[in-house]
Image: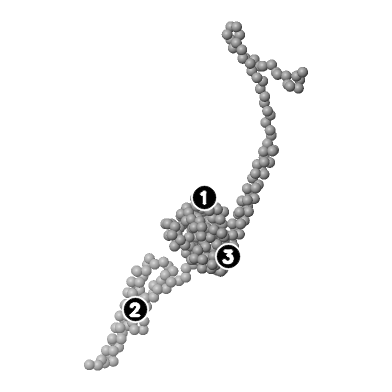
Amino acid sequence: MGLCLKDRHVLRYAGVALGLAFLVSGAAYGASVTKNVPPHIKSVVRADAHGRLIRTVIVSPRVVQPTVVTGSQVMSEPESAATADAAGVPDLVEAAAKRYDVDPLLVHSVIQVESNYNPYAVSPKGAQGLMQLMPATARRFGVRNSFDVKENIDAGVRYLKYLATLFPQDPRLTIAAYNAGEGAVWKYGNTIPPYRETEQYVYRVGMKYGKARRAAEKNEKKQPAELETAQAAAPSEPQVTYAPVQAFVDSDGRLHLRNAPATPSAEHNP
């Protein structure tokens, strides 16, 4: 059954009134829900062309003030820990080098090039710690924590010793094998592998090692000369001579002590 024109107008007005009612109630509901929302976030409820309610969230830009960092805050916590942990590195290097019969100057040269004494250093390839142990190398030498300074140095020095026994005639091959692996050195007929990284590594470690050796030899030659100079400059102590003492007992049994008369020298003897 069709509706007359009057009935259609009544239904249209009723729909509009119902939509307005929903709009008002929705706005009130939105206001109650978002009353604790920060002021830069707003929720808007509106009716579309079909009378359906749509909620829109509008977030306005928020200005963040810059934070001023003081000099004491520049060093991060891991770097502070690295400085504390690396404080005893020379003693650990000396002990490990003596234990495995490796030149400590070579160990220091490797550490300088590998990590520059940062115990938390990690390379793009995954090498870790002071002596940049690869995970496979760390497991090979029983390292549980590559960032532990003592464990890292001990394993690194042992690895250097092992490589030195493989290539005893040429320290450069030991250095090259530490960077590229002993397999790479064997692959190229016991020569430095033609890798740009390895060639630069051997050059840098060798340069530091040679400089350290020359400085140590110069210091060893300098110390005896300084000692001789100090001994020559020291004032000589005067020689003290004591006259001989004679003891005798008198007729009453009393002990007497007296200086013995000076003995004429041989040149005054007739």
Residue 261 picture quarter: top right
Quadrant including the C terminus:
top right
Give the image location of residue 134, x and y in percent.
Answer: 47, 62
What's the residue at 76%, 20% (across, down)?
268
N-term-proximal mark, 3 vs 2: 2
The CA distance from mark 2 to mark 1 is 82 Å
Looking at numbered disc 3 in the image, what kind of residue is underneath it? Gln
Looking at numbered disc 2 in the image, what kind of residue is underneath it? Leu
Give the image location of residue 45, x and y in percent.
Answer: 37, 76
For the residues carrying marks 3 and 2, which lies nearer the camera in this image? 3
Looking at numbered disc 1 in the image, what kind of residue is underneath it? Lys
Element on which disc 1 rests = helix
What's the residue at 38%, 65% (across, down)?
36
For the residues carrying marks 2 and 1, which lies nearer the camera in this image? 1
Image position of 13 with respect to 40: above or below? below
Image position of 236 with respect to 192: above or below? above
The residue identified by callout 1 is 98
Mark carried by residue 200:
3
Element on which disc 2 rests = strand
Dot 2 and dot 1 residues touching (CB under 8 Å): no
N-term-proximal mark, 3 vs 1: 1
Determine the residue located farthest toward the left in the rendered image: 1
For the residues carrying marks 3 and 1, which lies nearer the camera in this image? 1
